[in-house]
Image: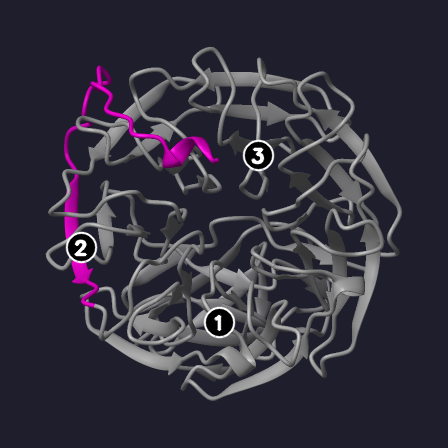
Amino acid sequence: MRPSQCVLLLLAAAAIAPAQTFTTLVNFDDNNGARPVFGSLVQGVNGNLYGTTHGGNSAGTIFNVSTGGTLTTLYKFDREHGDFPTSGLVLATDGKFYGTTPGGGGIYHNGSIYSMTPGGAVSFLFAFRVENGIEPEAPLIQATDGTLYGTARLGGAYGYGTVFTIDAAGALTTLYSFTGSDDGADPVGALVQAIDGDLYGTTTARGAAVGEDGTVFKITLQGGLTTLFSFNGTNGGQPYAALIQAADGDFYGTTLSGGVSGYGTVFEMTPSGTLTTLLSFLNDGAFPSSPLVQATDGNFYGATERGGDIGFGSVFKIDASGTLTTLHSFEGSDGEYPYGGLVQATDGNFYGTTSAGGTGGHGTIFGLNTGLGPFVRTIPTSGKVGSSVMILGTNFSGPATVTFNGKPAAITAQTNTEITAIVPAGATTGKVQVTTPGGTLSSNVVFRVTQ
C-alpha cells in the first residue's frame, strides 16, 4: 500500500507566501473527465495546456484548456486502444503530442503508446506485450536523436520493468530490463536527458541499500545502465517522480516516502551520484509524487499529495539550500490530492491539477500567479546550426526578431503564440530572445548549440 492511501491529517506550520493568486480554472464533472493523476500539463503551440484524466464517463480522456479555464475534451479512450492514462503528454518537434496508457491496447491490455495532433486526432503506435514491458505509467521524453524514450513499470525479461525507445512510426526497442536486484525495480517516473547526452531516471523499489527503497540510474541511448544511488529510507524512499537537471548542472527530485518522518523528501544529486537530502517533509506537506520544476526565478516548485492545512495537499516553493515556503494548501472545494506536477507556462504562471475535490469531487485544474513574468520556451532545447526550432510564448503580435545568444535568426513562421526559427550560423550556447513591439522576452533555459 502506498503511503498516500493512508488517512493523514497534518497541521501546516510553514508560512503562506504573500502576493500570489490561486485560481480554480476547471472543475471536472465526470462528463468532461475525472481524476487527473500523475501527468503534468504541457503547453501547446496554440498557448493552451494539454493533459489527461484517468477516468470520467469513459476509460480516460485527453483535453486541452486555455489559461482562462475553457476546457475542450479532445479524445475519450476505449479499452482496445488504451485505457485509464496516468501520465501526461510530451510535445515533440513534429508538432504532435505523444503519451502512454498503463492498460488496454491490443489483445493483451498491457498498455499502449499513442500520438495526437493538436486538434485531437489520435493514432495508436504500439501495444505492449510482457517481453517489452507492462503498465507504462510515465510520460515519454524526446531525446536529441529525435526518438522517444520511456519506461514500463513491470514486465521485460525479469518482470521488474523496462526502459524502451520508440520512433514516430511505432517501432519499439527494449533498451534495458531491470533485474529487481541492485539495479532496482518498478520504474514509474519519466526519464530526463542530461547535458551529457545520457538519460537519467529512478526506480521505486529494490536497489543495493538496506530497505530496498529504489534507485537513481543513468542509461545511455544504446542501453548501458549504471546505478548511481540506492535509497535506504532514511535518505528517502520510493522516488516516483522524474528528476530535473537544474541550471547548476545537478539533479533535483522528490521521494514519495522516507526521510525523518517517512513523509518524503526533496533531494539534490550530482551527475556522479552524490546525494544530499535538502528537506524531509514534516508538518509542511507529505508524499510528493510529482516532479519539481525550476522556474524563471531559479527556485524549485512542486506539490505534495497530502499534508498542508487539513491534509488535502499543498503547493510549495523550495530554494537550492532547502528553505521551503508553502504557497497553497488545498481545502477540498478547490481540489484535493495534487498527484501531478506543476508546469510554468510562458505567461509566467504555474498550472496544475488535483485528482479529487472541487465542486464535483472529480478533480480540478488550477492556476497560481506568483508574480513571475513571461518568457519563451524552445522545443527542442538544443540543436545544430540550420535546424528548425519552435519558440513558444504569448502575444507574438507584430514584427518579430529572434536571436540565439545574440546572433540574429531567420523566422520561417509566426503566430501569436509560436515562432519557428532557424539556428543561425555562428550561434553559440545561450539564451534565445524574441523581440516584438511589446518588448523582449528571453528563454527560460539556455539553448545548447550542438555540432
The amino acid marked with disc number 2 is Gly
Above or below for 164 versus 281 = below
Q: How far from the left and from the top, in percent, is residue 111? A: 61, 68
Mark 2 = which residue? 361
Earlier sequence position, callout 2 versus callout 1: 1
- Name the residue: 53% across, 48% down: 445
Is residue 95 in view from this perspective? no
Query: CA–CA distance between discs 2 and 1?
Result: 21 Å
Residue located beneath label 1 in the image: 83
Amino acid at circle 3: Pro
What segment carries the magenta color? 1-29
- The front one of 153 and 374 is 153
Comparing labels 2 and 3, the label whose residue is closer to the camera: 2
User: Residue 239: which numbered mark, if any?
Assistant: 3
Residue 359 on the magenta span: no
Of circles 3 and 1, the one toward us is: 1
Q: CA distance from mark 3 to mark 1?
A: 24 Å
Horizontal and vertical percent position of residue 172: 78, 72
Magenta stretch prevailing secondary structure: loop
Helix, strand or loop status at disc 1: loop
Q: Name the amino acid type tagged 1.
A: Asp
Nearer-the-camera pick, 126 or 374: 126
Residue 35 placement (x, y as % from top left):
32, 58
Label 2, label 3: how far apart the Cα atoms are = 28 Å
Query: Mark 1, residues whose alpha carbon is within 10 Å: few (<14), some, or many (≥20)?
Result: many
